[in-house]
Image (cartoon, coloured by chain):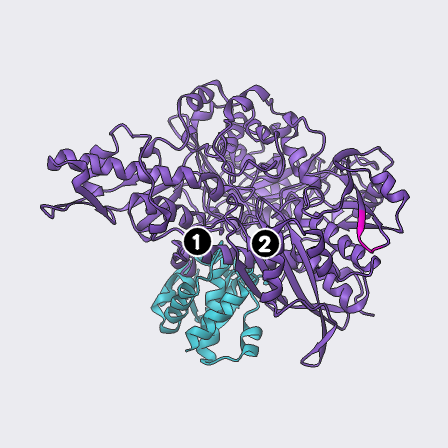
Chain colours: A purple, B cyan
Amino acid sequence: MDRLLTVDPIKLKDPLELQIEAQSAVLLMKPEGVSNLSRRAFLGFGASALVLGALLPSMPVRAQTAAAAVKPGTRIPAFLVIGKDNAVTLLSPFVEGGQGINTGLAQIVGEELDVNPSRFTVECAPPGPDYAVINGLRMTGGSFSTRSSYPLMRRLGATARDMMIRAAATKLKAKPETLKTEDGFVIHGASGKRLSYGELAPVALALPPRDDVALRDPASFRYIRQPVARLDVRAKSTGKAVYAIDQKLEGMLYAAVQHAPNQGTTVQSIANEAAVAAMPGVHSVHKLPGAVAVAADSWWRARKAVEALSVSWSAPAPSGLDTVAADYASDGLLAALKSSKEAGLPAETEGDATTAFATAAKVIEAEYDAPYLVHGQLEPPSSMARFNPDGTLELWAPNQMPELFQSVAAQTAGLAPDKVILHSPMLGGFFGRHFLYGSANPFLQAIQLAKATGRPVKVLWSREEEFRMDALRPLSFSRFRAAIGKDGRPTAIQARTVGEGPLGRWFGAVFKDPVDSSAVEGITEKPYAIPNRRMEYVKFPHPVTIAFWRSVGHSMNDFFYEGFLDEIADAGGQDPFVLRMDLLKDKPRHRKLLETVAAMSGGWKRGPYEVDGTRRARGVSMASPFGSETATIAEVSVQGGETQVHTVWVAFDPGSIVNPAIVKSQVESAVALGLSATLFEELVYKDGVRQSHNFDEYPILSRRSMPAVHVEIVESGAPMGGVGEPGLPGVPPAVVNAVAALTGQRIRSLPLAKNKIGV
Amino acid sequence: MTTLHVNGRAYQVAVEDDTPLLWVLRDTLGLTGTKYGCGIAQCGACTVMIDGTATRSCQVPVDSVGTADIRTIDAIEEDPVGRKVVEAWVAAQVPQCGYCQSGQVMAATALLKQTPHPSDGDIADAMTNLCRCGTYNRIAAAIRQAAG
């Protein structure tokens, strides 16, 4: 070993402690920009869209000024680099993590620029005001990338093409209108001269851009709306794609960590520090906030060493729900949510529910809950940090919000934000994992260890540490009541949701609306004509770190609502499909989707019926997540107490699309994750600690349980909605409704694996 | 000093005997195409071929490998079956995040080397690698296509 080095714990700044300047957030936001804000929705909530800007905590004055000076998405050279060899590099505001955004952007820009998207290289742009293209904010999330940037990226491509033509006109002494373009070349019709964009770029990209360039007629699109092949598929099929975990720096140390078993406790002492420091390859042993770390010359050596450390941790609080106490348990929290007597805040109120209940022919009531979930992205989190001789900090960190990470990294390192060079690597899956979650992000440790060792450091969390630290999809609970009339139709619905959502947790400092939309989305704003509604929300903070998880509040709330809607149908003696059609009488967009999914599945039939000697049944559900609409049907059987899902059909209406192949892939993927959560997933807290440590104790969907998935895209022409997340929320209720149709068992608590089905 | 035969080349490595092959490949040899996912042979992201058999390298101590022929994703296109698998993966547009796909391609290549025309049951038995993006159906389609 080189030397024994134990640093004093440096206080990590939790994002929650950072000063958030609401005013700067408001300044950053612009009223225009997102095409789909007509609906009261931005990540599911309305005026509080402003809040996201506030996520850029104490945005430095310099950056604010820059942001004010630059209109995001307009400076062509910030986005396009065209080499002499005519290779096109697009610097993207978004990070690629499997959703296919790199390919989609290449299609949109390439369409207008007149360059075949297959010739694009797309990289995640560095931090900077040019890339704040979502209403003055930059992030990859909320299924927002394509829909928020589509008009802007088209204009960017068209504007750049116009600059190429003007530069060529000067060079050829020709009138611009005598020039045309063809896949990266400007062509002079009369002389047949061809100039490549690459040779024109140095002059062209320095021209003042026009702001009135005409866009291409969609009828003549060659790339948009086509199933263009993904740009990254070959690299990802040959091991050549580079993720954060694969990166390496000259002279780098590898670091492994061991976190406190009880979240929130701290290192008291290490009994065998000297012995561990003498282990092969070990450079140094470190105490960090809530963790110990070892830096070594290989990660395996670092891991063995850090796991050999005998650490005394401070004791957690014995009891209570303000912290993760020694007796903290999932079932204890659920019991507390259920027994809360606090008055609810109105999340959605319509008509007169009180009278409707008083005059109902029948009233039903049910309680639904869903567990904590991990993200389970297959790439374990890592981050790499290096302090450069010029005083800058260079950071490679998986993230969904570069400017925010840069800002927090700067505060952690005691530098100005412009002294932090942030690289945003491709993500080996994210599903919401790489927002800023305080101690659940390893980049803070990388900065501290690089500072302490004076060497570049890569911190990698073992899968076990990731299970210990991942920010969780919150455990959730809602209680429903419905009033049913003599005709069997619902006259009123009431819901009481008790819990906490990630939006309120992480964006809440300036989020003035006390109703956390990420806790109630999927319960509010449903399309059904139930005249009297009283949906209420009680905030009940969790002591654990909670997260955005693919489809966020919809991931459990559409299960709750759509499951209960089937209960309403049953109580009123109605078929659940027919009842939905009936309640959507005035919603042609939704009826079309229901009709489409029914036709895809060969016509609606609930069952049970026999197929290949097994009894099967089907369930139906709808969801309206992230500006898109879905209708889902699942077919299930039950064998030996275990639910088998044979086929899932999804009719999906995101308004309009860019790449039908990628859209279908995303819906298939969302179905798989939704099914995984429905069947298997549950992160349980008991005695203050998480009970799963790896995938052997937290099963996720494997090939054995993967159903056939059929997706049909319906382009209604409504404003463009999201694609990455919306396929998920319909899956849990469709499956659970099918199980009820088959067995008569109504599952109100996920996952199915913890319930005995059909016995 | 241990001698390893990886992708047709011999490498001398100085690591502890119990070091998993995965970490020797990634950190010592710089062959980062092979991925770390779980470390307990559950997910299969670290799958390599050892003497033609798909093997989860996170659970293979380096001193147990001996003179065996180790093949990794980094050289997959040098293998005629591997090349066919890669082409099928591209044609079926299998990967999304892509992180598990190194292991999936290795498992599929090993399967097709041993069973050139696998049944659905063979595919189910051999392809136990996890994919969090849920690309399982496309993986199966790509294997059938590569099998011809």
Tell me what residue is drawn at x 36 percent, y 52 percent.
A223
Magenta: predominant secondary structure element? loop
**A489 in magenta:** yes
Marks counted in the figure total 2
Tell me what residue is drawn at x 62 percent, y 64 percent.
A598
Q: Mark 1 lies on which chain?
A: A
Foreground pick, A305 / A514: A514
Q: Would residue A675 be seen by someone viewing this image from the given angle?
A: yes
Give left or right: position of A129 versus A157: right
Give left or right: position of A547 versus A743: left
Q: Which mark is residue A659?
A: 1
Q: Mark 2 points at which residue?
A: A727
Q: Where is residue A275 in the image (x, y as percent from the top left)?
A: 61, 44
Q: Position of residue A758 (x, y in %)?
A: 80, 69
Q: Which amino acid does label 1 sit on?
A: Asn
Is B77 located above or below residue A308 in the figure? below
> Which one is earlier in the sequence, the residue at label 1 or at label 2?
1
SS at mark 2? loop
Q: Give the range drawn in magenta.
A: A487-491
